[in-house]
Image (cartoon, rainbow, N blue to C red):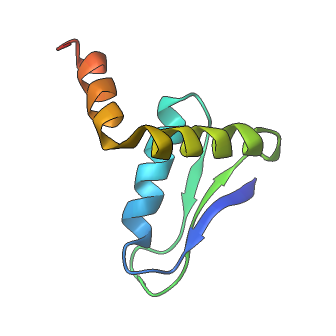
Amino acid sequence: MVALFASSDHKAEMEAMAINGLLQANGIPSVIVGPSTIPSLEFQVQVPRHLLDDARRTIEEARASGPDAADEAEQASEGTV
């Protein structure tokens, strides 16, 4: 496993959870590493080394699509579109 995302920012845990969810939804296994009880320490999202490029591409595509695409995808998964 290698780190795809790492941050000790005040919103690091939320970002890590969002990235982890995005990767999981796209079939890329990932884990969050970090102590939620000590928020000043670094959070990481780790993926298998052989999937690192796929994970990066997935995140880049999601950022390029923006929040509207995320809303559409969520609605589609719920069958409301």
Q: Is residue 63 left or right of residue 27?
A: left
Taking 34 as reference, is 79 above or below it? above
Residue furthest to the right in view is 50
Residue with the most extreme bottom position: 40
Q: Quadrant of residue 46?
A: bottom right
Quadrant showing the C terminus: top left
Please identify the quarter of the rendering in which residue 69 is found.
Answer: top left
| Observer-nearest of 78 and 67 | 67
Vertical position of residue 45 compared to residue 21: above or below:
below
- Estimate the x, y position of residue 14 in percent, counting from the top left: 37, 63
Q: Quadrant of residue 15?
A: bottom left
Q: What residue is shown at x 39% (from left), y 79% (from top)?
A: 37
- Residue drawn 23% across the image and 18% down it: 78
Q: Residue furthest left?
A: 80
Q: Residue at x 47, y 60 (%)?
A: 16
Question: What residue sits 55% from the left and 78% below the top?
Answer: 42
Q: Does residue 7 lie above or below 66 as drawn? A: below
- Answer left or right for 25 relative to 77: right
Q: Residue extending furthest front?
A: 64
The answer to whether 39 appears left or right of 44 in the picture is left
